[in-house]
Image: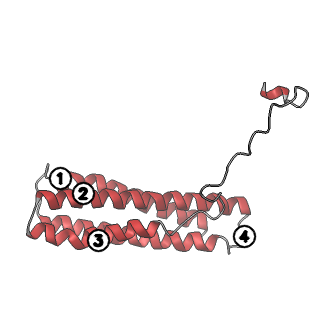
Amino acid sequence: MSAELNLLFLEKKVEASRLCASLTEPFATGTVPCEAKALIADYDTVLKRMDEALNDLKRLNDGLGRDGKLEEGDVRHLRQRAEVAIGEIARVAQDFAAQIRFFEAMNPGEPAAAVKPILERFDTIDKATREVTTKDGPEEGDEIMPEETGAVAEDEADPMLM
C-alpha cells in the first residue's frame, strides 16, 4: 500500500481519537452519570488505538526518506502531514489527561486511583510525540528571513509587487 494511503488511514485514526475525546468528556466531567469501570475501559481502548497510531506514524515518517519511489517534494509533504497527525495525537492525549484529572477531582477515592495508570499512559503518549521533530525546517533560534540591508533602489524594485 502506498505511503499516502497509509497516512490517510492513520489520520482517520487520529480523528477518531479526537471524536472519542469529545464523546467521553460529559462522562468524565460528571454531567452525564456513568460507571467508573466503563469509562476506564473506554479510555483504555482509545489509549491502545492512539498508541498504535503514534507508532505507525513514527514508522511511516522514518521510512519516507528510504522510499526511492517518492520525489523529494512528496516526501516533505507526507512528513508534514505525519507531523500534523502526531501533533493532533499530542493534543488528544492532553485532552484525555485533562478529563482524567477532572474525573479524579470529582471522584476521590477508588475511582480516582483506578484511572491513575491511564493518566500516566496518556502523559507518556504526549511525551512520545515530542520525539518526532522536523529535520527539514530551521533550527530554533535561526533567522527565517534575511536581514534587510536597506532600501531597494527604484530600478531594482519589481513593478509587479508595487
**Residue 123: percent from left, percent from top:** 34, 67
**Residue 156: percent from left, percent from top:** 89, 31
Callout 4 crowding tier (Cα within 10 Å): few <14, some 14–19, many ≥20: few
State left or right for residue 87 relative to residue 156. Answer: left
Which dot, 4 or 3, sits closer to the camera? 3
Q: What residue did someone put label 3 on?
A: 120
- Work out whether residue 99 can be spotted: yes
Give the residue drawn at x 59%, y 73%. Answer: 62
Circle 2: residue type = Gln
In the rendered structure, find residue 29 and report the number of the disc placed on it: 1
**Residue 42: percent from left, percent from top:** 24, 66
- Toward the viewer: 116 or 31? 116
Which image quadrant for residue 135? bottom right
- Name above or below for residue 66 compared with residue 143: below
State left or right for residue 7 relative to residue 159. Answer: left
- Spatial CA span between label 2 and label 1: 7 Å
Which image quadrant for residue 12? bottom left
How many numbered badges does the structure rendering display? 4
**Residue closest to the far right:** 155
Q: Earlier in the sequence, mark 1 or mark 4?
A: 1
- Toward the viewer: 74 or 5? 74
Circle 4: residue type = Lys
In the rendered structure, find residue 99 and report the number of the disc placed on it: 2
- Name above or below for residue 24 compared with residue 36: above
Q: Earlier in the sequence, mark 3 or mark 1?
A: 1
Q: Earlier in the sequence, mark 4 or mark 2?
A: 4
- Spatial CA span between label 4 and label 2: 43 Å
Circle 3: residue type = Glu
- Spatial CA span between label 1 and label 4: 49 Å
Label 2–label 1 contact, CB within 8 A: yes
